[in-house]
């Protein structure tokens, strides 16, 4: 029986870095959830990532992240990573 540990990490980003950083994190493959927050800590988008449903399903979310990046001066990405 496998026990999962969830580790939360907050990464500060600027609007220009946002989309690239999210793509990089998703590519790691052990991400359960991505939350994008503005500089005041307000959640702008919350994306749960299910293993095996990342491909085509994530395309609309990446488009939304691109739109948010255009408006975001600075903020952070809250990432939930699964550690086995």
Image (spheres, helix red, strand yellow):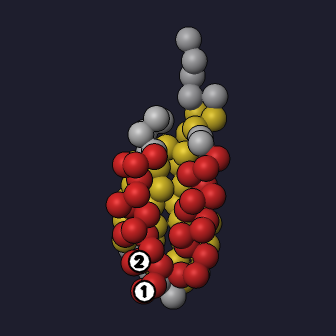
Q: Position of residue 10 (x, y in %)?
A: 59, 62
- Which quadrant of the figure has residue 82? top right
Whether residue 84 is visible to the viewer of this picture, yes or no, is: yes
Q: Secondary structure at mark 2?
A: helix
- Neighbor class of circle 2 (other Cα within 10 Å; few <14, some 14-19, many 20+) is some
Residue shown at the point (55%, 72%) measured from the top left: 18
Q: Quadrant of the N terminus?
A: top right
Q: Secondary structure at mark 1?
A: helix
- Neighbor class of circle 1 (other Cα within 10 Å; few <14, some 14-19, many 20+) is few
Residue carrying label 2: 68
- Which quadrant of the figure has residue 60? bottom left
26 in relation to 11, above or below? above
Q: Quadrant of the C terminus?
A: top right
Residue carrying label 1: 71
63 in relation to 27, above or below? below
User: Disc 1, disc 2: CB below 8 Å?
Assistant: yes
């Amino acid at each position: 029986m496998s026990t999962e540990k969830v580790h939360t990490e907050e990464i500060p980003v600027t609007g220009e870095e946002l989309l690239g950083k999210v793509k990089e994190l998703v590519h790691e493959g052990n991400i359960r959830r991505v939350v994008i927050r503005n500089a005041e800590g307000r959640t702008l988008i919350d994306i749960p990532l299910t293993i095996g449903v990342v491909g085509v399903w994530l395309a609309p979310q990446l488009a939304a992240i691109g739109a948010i990046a255009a408006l975001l001066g600075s903020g952070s990405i809250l990432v939930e990573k699964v550690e086995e």
